[in-house]
Image (cartoon, helix red, strand yellow):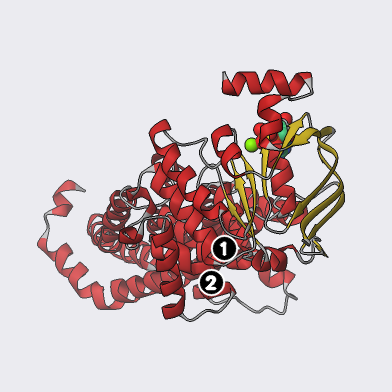
Amino acid sequence: MADMVKVENLCKNFGDFEALKNINLTVREGEKLVIIGPSGSGKSTLIRCINYLEEPTSGKIFIGGQEVTRKNHREMAKKYSAMVFQQFNLYPHLTVMENLTLAPMKLQHVPKKEAEEEAMRCLKRVGLEEKAKVYPNQLSGGQQQRVAIARALCTKQKLLLFDEPTSALDPEMVQEVLNVMVELAKEKITMICVTHEMGFARQVADRVIFVHRGEIIEEGTPEHFFTNPEHERTKEFLSKILH
Amino acid sequence: MLNGLLKANRWNALLEAIPEYYIPGFLMTLRTAICGLLLALLLGIIFGMLSTSRSRVLKAISRVYVEFFQNTPLALQVVFYYSCLPILLGGTGMRIPKFVLGLMGVGIYHGAYISEVIRTGIEAIPPGQSEAAKSQGFSYLQTMRYIIMPQTIRIIMPPLANQALNLVKNTSVLAMVAGMDLMYFTDSFGSSTGYFAQAYFCSALMYFIICYPLARLARYLEIRSMRQPVAKVNMTQMMEDSINV
Ligand SMILES: Nc1ncnc2c1ncn2[C@@H]1O[C@H](COP(=O)(O)OP(=O)(O)O)[C@@H](O)[C@H]1O
Ligand SMILES: [Mg+2]
């Protein structure tokens, strides 16, 4: 299968702090990749560099074989990737329906009726078709995150990026969001998820990478991480989150 | 003064002066205020957006504008436009029309305050909003138009109404340069007749007629904005910032 994402010698500094040190990573089309690692290790920075929310200090990023640059990153975002954030980041002044149709209508010039039909299909997939007319602040955290996932689906992107999508949720709402993500994972779509939900990782991930202090220090299948992680750091980290 | 207040002939003189003094003065003040407000909004939007851009130079330009005009008296600015600007423009003895002087005076001065209102309004929108927009492929201007500004506008309406109110009151500095505005005609009627109590009473009433509805509007917008689905912001602080002019 072709490569969906290719990261070459990626470095990212904030001032003189090296958040990412020479990252190399390839994600195949349709692959489900889970990124784990302690807080502050650079997971968000990595995923944000992939869609250019952070500009790499050096190194290259390719999506669908095409290099992402300062010049073309908006085009690339329109064409390939969608992101789900820890804090949902829904547009609070727009209804759920408008949140979903804004990008298709303004960026891809889909006619309103078509965009709304597609939005309803996406809402159905996350189980919220009855919430189309409400504003985000009338929804629970779990529902908001499901709307955010629907918004990401609505533009029919091939690459979905998730940055700790369940970390800001009350515990009882985590599962509803994970269920939606598990369903999504059954499709061809490429998914890169930063998450500490190891149950989810075990269920859907083709591969897990462990990031520590800006470097990928271990990678393997979910089974590998559960049964015989090699690195001391990895063992320590897993024992904390699995206890 | 006090017994003068009760003399009927003075009130009659006032009534007679209304068409000649107070109506043209009132209209001049209203015109200056409306056009001045438009200029202030235009400058405020431009400099407010510059101050939130990523370019240091643009930010600095906006900073200089805001600090300079906020930290010198409006009266001085208007007198400067009146006496020095014609010379700077070539010194042909040309006079700047009073109306233009007035709208420049309050427009540029309040533009600096409105720029700050708009900057705080834009900065009040959490960065996650632009990030979400950027991740969907919206350009900077599209992000401003569809996502940031619609939220900013709801937040800044109350302090903007306050600015409008202050702007109306501040048009009275035009009187210092014989600006043919309400305050000027008030002074003129007062000193030519000596009926100062009547003169100022009538003038105050006319300012009040414009300002009171604006004050109510500001209050209404403030209450309404607290119920709206936008990012949480510190409205009280913004209102206070915009009142201190
Ligand atoms: N905008 C920024 N400016 C300065 N430092 C940052 C910035 N973003 C992240 N960092 C730093 O980079 C490191 C990695 O951050 P992040 O990628 O958010 O970690 P993670 O998502 O793994 O918790 C952290 O030490 C963080 O403090
Ligand atoms: Mg993070």
From the top left corner, tell me how far across and down residue B95 is, in percent: 61, 77
From the top left corner, tell me how far across and down residue B211 is, in percent: 30, 59
Q: Which chain carries label 2?
A: A
Query: Badge 1 is on which residue?
Result: B144
**Is A216 left, or right, of B245 in this rendering?**
right
Picture disc at residue A138: none
Q: Which residue is drawn at 65% across and 67% down?
A: A78
Picture disc at residue A104: 2
Q: Residue at x 46, y 74 (%)?
A: A115
Tell me the quadrant of the picture where the N terminus of chain A can be found: bottom right
Disc 2 marks a residue whose amino acid type is: Pro
| Residue A170, image quadrant | top left
Disc 2 residue lies near ligand 2 with CB under 8 A: no
Q: Residues within 10 Å of mark 2 (few under 14, many from 20)?
A: many
**Disc 1, SS:** helix
Disc 1 marks a residue whose amino acid type is: Met
Looking at the image, residue A75 lies above or below residue B94: above
**Is B45 left, or right, of B54 in this rendering?**
left
Looking at the image, residue A202 lies above or below residue A160: above
Q: Which chain carries label 1?
A: B
Residue mark closest to the camera, 1 vs 2: 2
Q: Which of B137 and B27 is in front in this view?
A: B137
